[in-house]
Image (cartoon, helix red, strand yellow):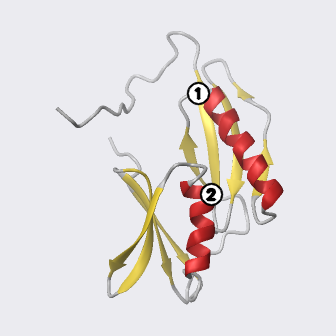
């Protein structure tokens, strides 16, 4: 079974300035709780964004950079509807202070086996993030699922 490990996003040359990274941190670190840092890679530097120690998004500059005019997105799974609502409220407050934040709201997607509660957010990067929770009736969960456990003894 595979799980998400990383995504590389390419940005136009000159994007990864101190100011850009500060703005990225204001949302992705301060609101979403990610750890972000500059890292040397392949003779250049990239900006490493980590939701947790096993997943990352690497921002690199390239003449041939990513462009996503549609709703291409990466899904972020929250543990509960309440967590989605909390993050959504923080994003709405953030958007009131910074008009570069884009939000798209959706009604719940309801099926017999799952209800998906979600919204989309895009800020500074050329991709949307689909922040969602999945609520399942008793006995309707997947046969297998990922669980994170503490690695400390």
Q: Which of 14 and 104 is in front in this view?
A: 14
Viewer-nearest of discs 1 and 2: 2
**Residue at image coords 59%, 82%:** 15
**Residue at image coords 65%, 59%:** 72
Q: Looking at the image, which residue sits at the far top?
A: 138
Q: In this view, does 96 lie to the left or right of 149?
A: right
- Which circle marks residue 15 in the picture? none
Between discs 1 and 2, the one toward the N terminus: 2
Residue 87 in the image: state x and y as whole percent. Answer: 66, 41
Residue 121 in the image: state x and y as whole percent. Answer: 70, 53
- Which circle marks residue 27 in the picture? 2
Q: Looking at the image, which residue sits at the far left?
A: 153
Q: Is mark 1 on a helix, strand or loop?
A: loop
Residue 140 in the image: state x and y as whole percent. Answer: 52, 15
Q: Is residue 95 left or right of residue 8?
A: right
- Which circle marks residue 80 in the picture? 1
Q: Distance between the residues labelled 1 and 2?
A: 21 Å
Which corner quadrant holds the C terminus?
A: top left
Q: Nearer the viewer, residue 16 or 112?
A: 16
Query: For the residue carrying disc 1, how many other residues have a C-alpha within 10 Å: few (<14), some (14-19), or many (20+)?
Result: some
């Amino acid at each position: 079974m595979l799980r998400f490990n990383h995504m590389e996003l390419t940005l136009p040359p000159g994007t990864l300035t101190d100011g850009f990274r500060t703005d990225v941190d204001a949302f992705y670190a301060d609101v979403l709780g990610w750890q972000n840092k500059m890292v040397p890679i392949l003779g250049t530097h990239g900006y490493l964004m980590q939701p947790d120690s096993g997943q990352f998004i690497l921002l690199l500059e390239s003449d041939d950079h990513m462009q996503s005019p549609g709703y291409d997105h990466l899904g972020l799974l929250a543990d509960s509807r309440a967590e989605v609502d909390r993050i959504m409220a923080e994003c709405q407050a953030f958007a009131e202070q910074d008009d570069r934040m884009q939000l798209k709201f959706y009604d719940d997607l309801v099926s017999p086996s799952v209800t998906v509660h979600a919204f989309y957010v895009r800020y500074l990067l050329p991709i949307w993030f689909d922040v969602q929770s999945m609520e399942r009736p008793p006995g309707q969960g997947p046969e297998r699922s990922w669980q994170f456990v503490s690695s400390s003894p």
